[in-house]
Structures are given as C-alpha cells and as structure tokens.
Amino acid sequence: MREIAFIKQNKSKWLDFEQSLKTKSKRNPDELADAYIQLLNDLSYAQTYYPKSKTTVYLNFLVSQIYRKIYKTRRIEHNRVAYFFKTEVPTIVYSHRKKIIFAFVLFFFFSLLGALSARYDRTFVRLVLGDAYVNKTLENIAKGDPMAVYKSGNSFGSFIGITMNNIGVAASAYIYGLSAGILTFYIALQNGIMLGSFQYFFYEQGVLEQSIRGIWLHGAMEIFSIVISTAAGFILAGSFLFPKTYSRMYSFKTGVQDSLKVFISTVPFFVTAGFIEGFVTRHSNTMPLWLNILIIISTLSIISFYYLLYPTIVNKKQSHVSISTLQKT
C-alpha cells in the first residue's frame, strides 16, 4: 500500500486518538487498551514499509503517549515514588534519547575543547578557574597534597553546600531551556570547558592520577547528572521549537512535564555525589586504590545504566505488553 493511501485510510482514527490525549476527561481503560493495540499494529506496518517517514515518527509518538495514559488510569498499588523512577522516568528518557545523546556529545566536545585550549594557551586555565584557585592548588601540589581543597571545612557543611550548588547549576541548565536552549547551550559550554581545562591543568602538573582518584569519586555522578539536566533543558526547548504534528501549546505542556520529571530524577544522584564529595573525597589519597576504583566504577555504572540502558529495557517490556495485561488496567 502506498503511504498516502495508508494515511488516508487511518487518518480519522489517528486524529480521534490524538484528540483523546488532549482532553482531560478520563477514557475507558478498555478503549485505551484497544487504541494502543491498533496504533501498535499501524506503527509496526509503518516501520516495515515507511521506516524513515514522518508518519512512522508520528505513530511512534502516539503509541508512547497512549501507553503512558493507560498507566495513569491504572490504580497504582505500589509506591508512587518507586513507579516514578522505575517506569515513568525511563519511559520519558527513552522517548527523548536523541536529546540525551546530543547533550553528551556536546559536553564531551566542549571538554575536549577546554583541554586543547589549556594546552595551547598557558593563560587559559587561570582565565577559566581564576588566579586564586590556581595559585592555591599549585601550593597544595608543592606540598604533596593536590586534593587538599577537598579536605577543608566541615564534612556535613560541605555536603549540604556542594549538593545545593550542584542542584542550582542543574536547575539553571534546565530552566534556561526556555531561552530556546541558547542559555542551556552556554551552560554546557561553560561546564565542559571548565572540566577539560581543569583536568589538563592537573595533567600538566604531573598529578593527573591523584586528581582522577579524588575528583571522579564524586564527579562520575555529579557531571553525568549535570549533562542529564542539560538534556532536560533541550527537551524543554524542543517542545515549543519543534512541536511536530501537535499544536505548539500542547507540545509545550507535554515538554514541560517530561523535562521536569527528567530533571527531578537527577536530584538523588546529586545528593549521592554531594555526600561522597563531602565525606569520602577528602580521604581519596589515603584509601586503598582498589576501593577508590570500586567507588568510581560503581557510581558511573549505576547512573549510566539508569539513563542509557534501563530505558531501552523498559521500552522493550512496554512494546511486548500482552492484550490480557492491558485488559487489567
């Protein structure tokens, strides 16, 4: 069947489903289940015969939205917070995976740019990090304790201050999505260049290993979470810049909900990173190397799995939901 005939044959049905998503009135769960099955069949057909078509993109979006509405009409008997992190956020992350990948590519590019700038311009690190920080760190390196800056202050006070500061930076990256993503882009630039120049500075001073052992204890979760918050900003920006087949207002409302949930999901990771930085990082050079490596690998693996692998697992489970399961909703 030609695509135009396929669209003509099913257009009224799709528009009806789309309208049901926009209305606040609750639809019968059995009707939603039936709509989900029909759309899933249409999507499967479109993916087979029109894989690169806008029709396929449109149907994929409808399927994901109706699935989410089905689960909103369920009586969720388990813990709402658990459902939020176990199902809701991974579903959203999967639907916006391209923006997540874009945020990572952008951040790593800016980090590389920062390292290269620090290599070819000896004044660049001072420009980015400030003379006071650079001078203090050089003093600490001369004393044989490059990570001394992380040992100052009260552990609990550092934990609270660091956590609130990181969440503030992440919140800015997210909210700045309202600037059409321009200021979110700037925060990605600023943080990426800072990280790249920062690490090159320690490499240049011959203490890269000590810096990795100290900084990445908390940095794995902290930096990863900032990148995810940046992606949330791009999700917000994309919702009103690229509404696709939906009205700009409806797309924006959906984008606000999705991006806010993605941002909120990073908070536990920021708290964990802040705790590690406040209580553990100060002992980075005295703890056994195996423990140091274990913490870095563990924190990086947990957050990488949650945002990069787990959403795909959840999506596959959703795609194979049986009719009998849907009828129980």
Image (spheres, rainbow, N blue to C red):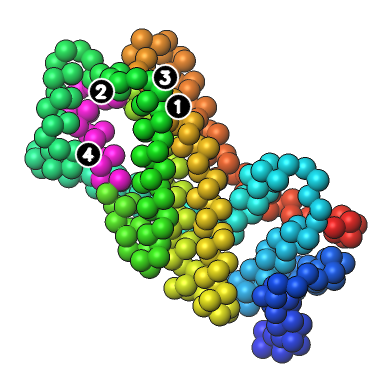
Q: Which residue is mark 3?
A: 280
Which of pointers 4 and 1 indicates the residue nearer the eye? 1
Any mark on residue 275, and which? 1
Which of disc 3 and disc 4 is earlier in sequence? 4
Q: Amino acid at mark 2?
A: Val
Above or below 240: residue 274: above
The alpha-carbon separation of the residues under discs 2 and 3 comes to: 13 Å
Observer-side mark, 4 or 2, equals 2
Asked if marks 4 and 2 touch (Cβ < 8 Å), the reply is no
- Amino acid type at mark 1: Phe
Left or right position of 103 against 15: left
Distance CA(mark 4)–CA(mark 1): 25 Å
Can residue 14 be seen from the camera position used here? no
Q: Earlier in the sequence, mark 1 or mark 2?
A: 2
Q: Main secondary structure of the magenta part?
A: helix
Which residue corresponds to mark 4?
A: 197
Q: Could you say whether the residue bearing mark 4 is in a helix, strand or loop?
A: helix
Q: Which residue is mark 2?
A: 149
Check if mark 3's residue and mark 1's residue have beta carbons within 8 Å. yes
Please tell me which of labels 4 and 2 falls first in the chain: 2
Q: Is there a contact, CB below 8 Å, between mark 4 and mark 1?
A: no
Spatial CA distance of label 4 from label 3 is: 24 Å
Is 231 magenta? The answer is no
11 sits left or right of 160 in the view: right
Element at label 1: helix
Q: Amino acid at mark 3?
A: Val
